[in-house]
Image (spheres, rainbow, N blue to C red):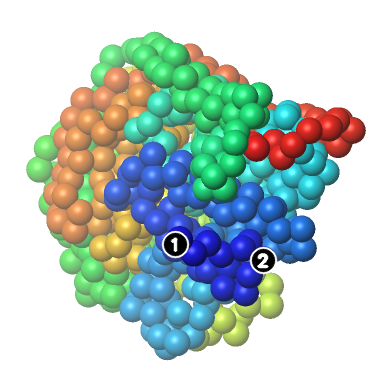
Amino acid sequence: MRLRLAPGAPAERVAAPAAALVAGIAHAASFAPFGAWWLQTVTMAFLVAVVLRAQANAAAGAARAAALGFAFGLGWFVAGVAWLYVSMHRYGGMPAPIAALALLMFGAYLALFPATVCALAMRAARVAGSAPGAVAAVGLVFAGGWTLAEIARGYLFTGFPWLAIGYAHVDGPLAALAPLAGVYGVCALAALAAYGIGALAASVARGARTRATPLALAVVLALAPLVAGWAMTGRSWSQPTGRSLAVRLLQGNVPQELKFDPARSLAAMQAYTAEVLRAPADLTVLPETAWTVPWSATPAALRDALLGHLAAGGGVLAIGMPLWEQAASRDPAAARLTNSVAVIDRDGSIAARYDKRHLVPFGEFIPRGFGWFVAMMNIPLGEFARGDKVQAPLAIDGQRVAFDICYEDTFGEELAAQVREGATILVNVSNIAWFGDSHALPQHLQIARMRAIELARPVLRATNTGVTAAIDARGRVVDALPTYSAGALALSVQGTTGLTPYARWGNALPLALGLVMALAGALACVASRRSRGANPLE
């Protein structure tokens, strides 16, 4: 005889959150480096099934659903961003127990978002009752709520959009919809599909007789997003423009623990200079903080060698380095450094610059009240100044190249603004050696691929330790250097023109989609409350 736990049994109250926690950990594996988009759908569907099972208990409510969503989110985020422990402990010198606790607390904060969505979905299910259309109504509330929660997570406290579920789908059918509504639009459809599958699974698990209408609605929720994605696959959103640029992307592989040692910093500049001199290119790009000092502090011998290379037709040279903010001439005493990309002219001046706009908390500025936390780490932190919100792309032989620095490329709406300014090629310079040889590196590459798909622009990445890569306007990696190796990636890059709907409207489209789904689902739940019938899947 098979023993089945009642939804309200004490053992079930422990087993269900534990299962949700494990599912959340598996959910983290749907992102790079594993990149199994179907695993994202399956694990979220499992969460839905667990929440719906809890609904069968009359005593269970929103708090129970929230606990399940929190457990799922805790496993998802702690496993997904465990590389933060590496930066805090290995490179920051924070004691291991405190670093682990900080990671756990950060994961708990992020887990509040799925917890809130699950609580709302449970409330919607209770309001909808057992009407046949309830499964579709609650599914819309769940998917719309998840979308809004992901968007909120990308904005609150300067934003942390890393691991938004849409990123798991860069190689799946839903990626074809990213040019329409961006990664958050993909989030909405991925959540909708997962809800449909989870609702079906919950029905099967109960062993109940399934009514035709709710079953059909669940199947539609599960399949409609995937069918829409497959239908859009192969559509072109941009066209080639101008001539191709010969580009060299340099990867220095400077160990993070030595990067700010004066002798090692000089050795890095010497190595980068030697690599620049090795071959000319239309555009040569060095990573974030390849120079740990401003251009004015460059040793004369290296400066003269680089200028001679440029004068001899070496092309355009872009170097990641700190620069004094442009307002320094007005008030030198109050001047601060910016995290910048400097384009060096052949006369030795800085012909153009890009100053990072979206700074990283604890890495580039200290949030108010958290000085004590940063004091526990040995990190050469400066309070960087923010760059201007609008900075024009750099014109190179008919192409318009827009730079962004490291973490900035997780904010698609900011890169969309660069495309609206006329950018035909996007270039990211990064140094995420702070996170060691961890899954942060392939995750960041996955994010860059989503930007290329959303905006229909080639994306170039010049990094310190990886992943230095070229991505085409369809999000495919054209070529890449091995991680944790020094070298140069040389290739020809064709810029593109044309605006995708996402490039034109940014996050306004997925925000509207999430609001419409959530509102329509909520109204349908209220309407369903007045109808009669059995449980929506029984």
The kind of residue on which mark 1 rests is: Met
* Lateral position of residue 459 relative to residue 100, left or right: left
Residue behind mark 1: 1
Look at the image and tell me whether residue 493 can be seen: yes
The kind of residue on which mark 2 rests is: Gly
At 29% from the left and 66% from the top, the residue drawn is 436
Q: Quadrant of residue 325?
A: bottom right
* Lateral position of residue 154 relative to residue 145, left or right: left
User: Looking at this rendering, what residue extends furthest in the front direction?
Assistant: 1
At 41% from the left and 73% from the top, the residue drawn is 85
Whether the residues at callouts 1 and 2 have beta carbons within 8 Å, the answer is no
Q: Quadrant of residue 167?
A: top left
At 49% from the left and 64% from the top, the residue drawn is 3
- x then y, percent, for residue 371: 61, 80
Name the element at disc 1: loop
- x then y, percent, for residue 328: 59, 57
Label 2: how many residues lie within 10 Å, few (<14), some (14-19) or many (20+)? some
- x then y, percent, for residue 246: 21, 27
Q: Quadrant of the C terminus?
A: top right
Q: Quadrant of the N terminus?
A: bottom left
- The image shows residue 256, relative to residue 114, as above or below, that is below
- x then y, percent, for residue 210: 60, 33
Q: Nearer the viewer, residue 161 or 199?
A: 199
Name the element at disc 2: loop
Look at the image and tell me whether residue 107 can be seen: no
* Lateral position of residue 62 relative to residue 83, left or right: right
Q: Nearer the viewer, residue 280 or 121?
A: 121
Residue behind mark 2: 8
At 46% from the left and 49% from the top, the residue drawn is 43
In this rendering, the label closer to the viewer, 1 or 2 = 1
